[in-house]
Amino acid sequence: MPRDLPLANGQLLVNFDTRYNLRDMYWPHIGLRNQTEGHVSHSGVWVEGRFSWFDADGWQRDMRYQEDSLLTEVTLTNDDLQLTIECSDVVDFDRDILIRRMRVTNRADHPREVRLFFHHDWHIGESEGANTACYRPTLKALLAYKDQCNILVGGLVGGENAGAPRASRQAEEGITQWATGYKEFNGQQGTWRDAEDGELGGNPIAQGSVDSCAGFWLGTLEPGAARYCYHWLTFGARFAEARLLHELILERGPEQLIERTRNYWHLWVTTKPLDLGDLPPHLVSLYKRSLLLMRTQIDDDGAVLAATDGDVWTFARDSYAYMWPRDGALVANALSHSGYGDITSAFFHFCRRVITDEGYLLHKYTPEGALGSSWQPWLGKDGQPELPIQEDETALVVYALWQHYLLFHEVEFVRPLYRPLVKAAADFMVQFREPHTRLPAPSWDLWEERHGIHAYTVAAVYAGLTAAANFADAFGEEDHAARYRQAAEEIQAATRQYLWNEQAGRFVRMINVSPDGTITPDMNIDASISGLYQFGMFPATSDEISKTMAAIENRLLVKAQAGGYARYENDYYHQVSHDIENVPGNPWFICSCWIAEYRIARAETIDALHEAIPLLEWVQARALPSGVLAEQMDPYSDAPLSVSPLTWSHAEFVSAVRWYAGKHRRLTEAGAPGAHA
């Protein structure tokens, strides 16, 4: 189920799904140690003897963020229960606190008692075992803990000023009722079932595979009247740390923390220069939302997570909650070009810490920098050792770092990265070459499915070596610069010689080279071939690129309801249709953005530039109401598929917008036709 509403602060991340269930709860690293392991934590309401969880079918849900902030705006309406609940959720921007505010309005024509219930399915340390949940009577709060993770569950109830500081508010502090109990053991479902009669059993402690439920009695609401419930979770390695945060909320009032966090994110996303040409407001809005959503997926220690949607775990027994260097580099590049170099700096230092002594980056990493799980073997099909790498991951980090330097000119920042990261990677790329063609040696492709010499990888290595040569020039090492530049030029020439297919009139996706030098091309059309212009190897206006991109646009357009562009012909991943002629694969947001970037790159007039706007609007129209972009979509229903949000999808949209803005500025300054229309 898509994660509609991620909230984070660089250490704590929570995700709400499309039915407004609290699902993922990562702490103390973004993407590491999901304290619920993606299981549903229910929220619900009891009114006048009737009960309903918010994920039930009777609710209408409008789930969005407040504009230009990471504060949710969720409206829940249930006509049968005659209730409206206005909800706001926030993760404090620098304290590990989740606060939920609910304003409940009685729409019936008579007074009614209302109670709210918040359930949490604990899997602390990403395991259901050896957890403890207990009630702490002196705090009037629940505590869940295991090892070095303590989570306090608290709240209060009151009127209009319930969220004010303690000295001035009128509110009832603490949980009204509670339950702790067992689940996933001997057929037990959990304490959320205990809530459905509007009463909680009050069991004071449970250990093992446990959950807990907190109940808040809002009292009797007159017709048309509203009452507030504030509910929060505080996190600490020690109980004392979680307790101090709990007491801080009570003393200062939850509203103050909500407001300061709303203001922080508004400041964060609106103070950078924002010259986006003549893009319409709804695209500018998604651009800013994408920046904010990208930030939620970045750990303070530098890891850029591919996705934190815990649902993928349920069918793959693994997740996307890793740092792929390629995804990270492309996200960092988008953020750097948007003015957020302070965030991307930590990413490059992360890569410096994890790069091997030989100068390459491996498949993926945990947020702490440990090697992530992998399916790429160290043994090739020929029985010989091979590196389990995607070489574009190494190359794109160097490329993105040079882009960062061009934008910010921070010599002191680059200095400690130059030798262990830039030179090490460049020296590796120079020598890791296929002997017959002098192209980069075979590695895994960016889709992690095929082993060979790929157009995308070749383009990325060219860009990485060119960036390394520029760094070497800047640091006065002319001999290294010459060696890196020569290797890049050799790869460019070899790409034209070996990846161009004259009969097809386009570049091919991949080649394989046998030990005797025989070359076998892979003729499948793949959107990633566009890397040959994206990373500067060939101009977008060149004849070779024009013909190649024409084939991509023609063959990979999804001719079903959803539209957009697929990754490649007969894409099997989450495949919905076998009608390959009309649906070559599911539409991916990143591939559709690549086509937009191509139209931008080749535009020589404002009118031509405007040809990219329909594709950007296609992306915007298929975002969730919250602005979240999935990895891919059902070609017939537009439903999100795979993880949601995918950080790379948002990065590619931001990049396309930056390409558009830059091209619009240059065309306008040059007085291109239509520039002042």
Image (cartoon, grey):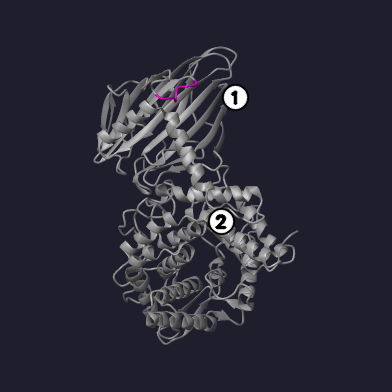
Q: Examine the rendered structure and indicate whether residue 623 appears above or below residue 430.
A: above
- Under mark 2, the amino acid is Phe
Q: Nearer the viewer, residue 657 or 515?
A: 657
Q: Is residue 580 visible in the rendered structure shown here?
A: no
Q: Nearer the viewer, residue 590 or 155?
A: 155
Q: Secondary structure at mark 1?
A: loop
Q: Nearer the viewer, residue 228 or 515?
A: 228
Residue located 33% across and 64% down the image: 352
State whether the magenta stretch is mostly helix, strand or loop. Answer: loop
- Percent across and percent down for residue 21 are 46, 36
- Percent across and percent down for residue 158 are 45, 19
Q: Examine the rendered structure and indicate whether residue 477 appears above or below residue 24.
A: below
Residue located 51% across and 83% down the image: 493
Q: Residue 34 is drawn in which quadrant?
A: top left
Q: Examine the rendered structure and indicate whether residue 280 appears above or below residue 356.
A: above
Q: Nearer the viewer, residue 562 or 496?
A: 496
Image check: 609 left or right of 647?
A: right
Query: Which range is magenta?
Result: 160-165
Q: Quick one: label 2 or label 1, which is nearer the N terminus?
A: 1
Residue that badge 1 annotates: 79
- Percent across and percent down for residue 315 are 42, 49
Number of dots carrying numbers: 2
Q: Residue 222 is drawn in which quadrant?
A: top right
* Label of residue 199 in the image: none
Q: Is residue 74 visible in the rendered structure shown here?
A: yes
Between circles 2 and 1, the one closer to the viewer is 2
Task: Assess whether mark 1 and mark 2 are in contact (beta carbons under 8 angstroms).
Answer: no
Residue density around tag 2, few if under 14, some if 14–19, many if 20 or more, within 10 Å: many
Residue density around tag 1, few if under 14, some if 14–19, many if 20 or more, within 10 Å: few
* Label of residue 653 in the image: 2
